[in-house]
Image (cartoon, coloured by chain):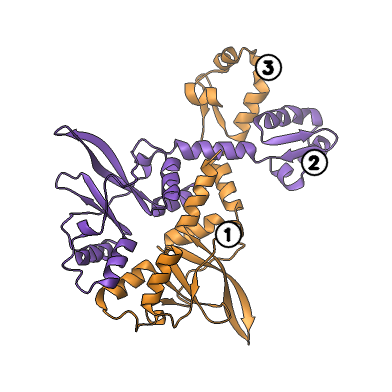
Chain colours: A orange, B purple
Amino acid sequence: MDIVKKNEPITSEQIAEKLNLTRSALRPDLAVLTMLGVLEARPRVGYFFTGKAVDTLISEKITDIKVDEIKATPVIVKESTSVYDAIVTLFLTDVGTLFVSDDEGNLQGIVSRKDLLKTAIGNTNTHQIPIGVVMTRMPNIVTVTPEESAYEAARKIVDHQVDALPVVKAVIENGQEKYKIVGKVTKTTITKLFVELGKN
Amino acid sequence: MDIVKKNEPITSEQIAEKLNLTRSALRPDLAVLTMLGVLEARPRVGYFFTGKAVDTLISEKITDIKVDEIKATPVIVKESTSVYDAIVTLFLTDVGTLFVSDDEGNLQGIVSRKDLLKTAIGNTNTHQIPIGVVMTRMPNIVTVTPEESAYEAARKIVDHQVDALPVVKAVIENGQEKYKIVGKVTKTTITKLFVELGKN
């Protein structure tokens, strides 16, 4: 693979020479690599390296990783928390997004740095404003489940232009559908996963 | 590969049967896949699927992508911009980080949402504070060059716990080393790249 990548187009004779092998010894390997889509053979020109097989493998790997394996711990506050206390919590816990739940841990809202900044800039008394007033409220929140893939989570973050997704499990409570917060996936989570994949 | 992945451990006889082939027809393919590190053969047990070769391919691909190919357009303001105007710019341009340059486009500083939030919460008059006072100033800024890899950029973001890196080119001006801002790489850039890799 490396030889073809660096010397394409290259004939099987040339590859054989570089490896100090006969052409016939090489034939099955080239056949399989071509079949796998790693190499492409053009008659009377030689072999080319094609990224296609690699792209498919990468895409398979990324869709194989589940949200459950990568999810991070969310910082959760109550709806009655003041904007001031929410900002302090954001700095103390060093996160970018706060999740808001009821006493049972069910998702009610989500507050971003931008929501807090918008409120802080115009108001002198952020102690008096509960975050329930400034948060994005259910059902207007993009969520993800532990069973979905890392790819699916990243796609939702990009498509909906949000920084973070709550990872939720749907439960029925008193005949109503509720969403328990069990984690979060953020742009940081995806960036860390990207670094993991790049290590090696 | 798929057959082994789903049925491991599986013997060559069983694979041949599933594909309606003879064992000897299959032998070269299995030999190459084992050599590539995609499959692992254990005597008297059968073939296993090993992610090793796939991990190496992914890691190679990620380090092959250059910052120059993925960099986004930075929003640049002047040092004298007020914190209030910087916050307005942040919302109008829908970004998370502002870069600060001199009149020649040389990097002077960087301002995050958290820097602005910290200033906004305690101060009633953000019109009077220039961002030069609150920004992180050179040389305390983590930068990346267009020639570095996407992997390297993501690693810097994770290791230094920042949201964004300015992409810079070093130039000598009046005997001093300066850094021209030519782009940015953020957690959003990496998340978008991750989605690109997952598509297919």
Instruction: Find residue B20 and name its label.
Output: none
Query: What's the distance in space between the residues labelled 1 and 3, CA to CA?
Result: 45 Å
Query: Mark 1–mark 3 contact, CB under 8 Å?
Result: no
Report, in whole angstroms, how far the alpha carbon at label 3 lies from the one at label 2.
27 Å
Report whether mark 2 lies on the same chain as mark 1. no
Residue behind mark 2: B10
What crowding class fits label 3: few (fewer than 14 Cα within 10 Å), some (14-19), or many (20 or more)? few
Image location of residue A69, percent across then percent down: 61, 56
State which chain disc 2 sits on: B
Foreground of the two, A187 or B17: A187
Is A111 located above or below residue A15 in the figure?
below
Say which element carries label 1: helix
The secondary element bearing badge 3 is classed as helix
What residue sits 50% from the left and 38% below the top? B61
Give the residue at mark 3: A25
**Amino acid type, residue under disc 3 in the picture:** Ala
Residue A38, how many percent across, how many down?
57, 32
> In this view of the protein, which residue sits in the foreground, A42 or B119?
B119
Above/below status of A92 relative to B26 = below
In percent of the image, x 26 and y 36: which residue is there?
B170
Q: Residues within 10 Å of mark 1 (few under 14, many from 20)?
A: many
Amino acid type indicated by mark 2: Ile
As drawn, the label of residue A67 is 1
